Image (cartoon, rainbow, N blue to C red):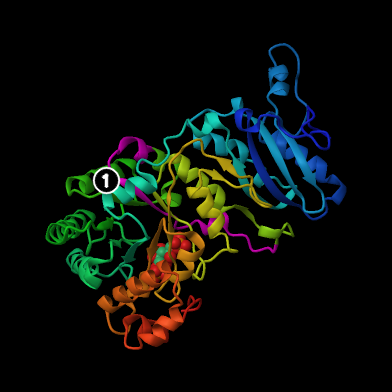
Amino acid sequence: MAVQFNYVAPKGWKPKNADRDYLITYLDIELADGIPEDKFEDAVASCAAESSTGTWTKVFSGKNSGVKLADKLKAIAYDLDPKTKTFKIAYKREIFEEGNMSGLLAGIAGNIDSMKMLKAFRLIDVRFPESIVKSFPGPQFGIDGVRKFMQIESGPLMCTVAKPKIGRTAKEQAALAKILFTAAKGEYQGIKDDENLTSLYFNQFENRCRRVHKVRRDIERKTGKRKMFLCNTTHSDMDIMLERADMIKEQGGRWMMMDVVTTGFTAVQTVRNQNPGLAIHAHRAMHGLLDRESGPGVYDKREIMDFSMSMVVIAKIMRLLGVDSLHGGAPKTKMENYNEPKLIQEALQSAVTPQGPMTLGQNWFGMKGVWHTASGGLHSGSIGESIKKLGEDIILQAGGGVLGHPWGIEAGVEAMVQARDIAMKRLDIEVWIKNNPDSALAKASSHWGFGPKIVY
Ligand code: CAP
Ligand code: MG
């Protein structure tokens, strides 16, 4: 073994006072073809070395070499399972700069997923110690803060992303907002920009922001009901994003939207720190390049085929960085990933996220929770499952599932509100439809059924 120190713990070792002293990762690997199975422990040692204090060969250990401290601060791999090729690494918390997510990730997942000795790698979970959790801002509003400013005491929030996802002018989008804000006796909360609608010649950000918020203010004044516009500020220039956030604030907006994977961890933390006052709605476009795993091993410890980090880890990172809502998948959707949404919701909302066979759990030390946004091919026939499985601190987003209703947009909203009420009262949707055959929900369910459309 070329590594300089012993990076593998004796069998049965567990980190003492983990939540005080260690950051822990849970990993799954596949050895590259040609590397014999009995090299698993060496591969694990290389991962622990490469992600903490070591490298591929022994190095100078004389005067001023730093080797003594490197040995003291090295990571320790434990719970090695040669059958499933899973293991955990415990890192002393002192090797991470508090409040610095980019630096932390460069450490624990910076090099090891690029090592030639592996042909697959998955960062299944990360458990952060108290000092690191507390070094991040966390959500500014969270579940209760959003309920307060939206004046919605219970039940999910509902919104619709304009579809076609780009095509409407700012004026046309404001007209759609008016319909969404007033249909179904004003029981619907909002409108959302889609991931690729930023500022385009036919729908410039400032124009859209002004027009849609004007409609929002008028409707709020008339009805006394709070509405939300998830206005997409996404840009790769931080200053432009912050300017856009300020424009939303000038319009009296309460929410901003940003795509958190394409803008990155630094953008999320900077927006959270520099822009108090707006709730951050985190869209996760491009997350599939980070979290999708095509092998059977993603949740039952069999073989994995790709290089990935789970959405549970991304969800924990976003809660620490301080978003107020995050797209986290949902049952019966077009992008459902191995029934993961429940684990994501627990990472986003629990005071203490439970440990499970494939999760390390997490004590949040009082950090606020995050709204779980359920979306992706959702419609009135399938949202009941989201409420049943994910609870009511969720944002239900249906784009096509409202705008594609055969009787038009208002009927799409009505069907969503009817389905929400049925689910909240724990009624049987098919019995309700039988008793209400002329309802918007009955029409929607005859059109789309009760599941997602996978191929369009
Ligand atoms: C949904 C959506 C969302 C994705 C995000 C879309 O539209 O606007 O961006 O669903 O998925 O572009 O597909 P529909 P997730 O409601 O018409 O499906 O929430 O899983 O990140
Ligand atoms: Mg979209």
Q: Position of residue 66 (x, y in %)?
A: 68, 17
Q: Position of residue 183 (x, y in %)?
A: 23, 72
Depicted 159 relative to depicted 380: above or below: above
> Does residue 305 appear in this view?
no
Residue shown at the point (42%, 69%) measured from the top left = 423
Q: Give the left or right position of residue 6, taking residue 162 as reference.
A: right
Residue farthest toward the top in the current orientation of the protein: 63
Q: Give the left or right position of residue 169, taking residue 47 as reference.
A: left
Q: Position of residue 273 (x, y in %)?
A: 35, 35
- For disc 1, the marked residue is 245
> Does residue 331 appear in this view?
yes
Q: Give the left or right position of residue 101, taking residue 355 as reference.
A: left
Q: Quadrant of the N terminus?
A: top right
Determine crowd level at label 1: few under 14, some 14-19, many 20+ residues with C-alpha closer than 10 A.
many
Check residue 380 for magenta coloring.
Answer: no
Depicted 103 relative to depicted 187: above or below: above
Check residue 282 for magenta coloring.
Answer: yes
Ligand 2 within 8 angstroms of badge 1 C-beta: no
Residue shown at the point (53%, 48%) measured from the top left = 347
Residue shown at the point (68%, 24%) measured from the top left = 73
Q: Position of residue 27 (x, y in %)?
A: 68, 47
Q: Amino acid at mark 1?
A: Ala
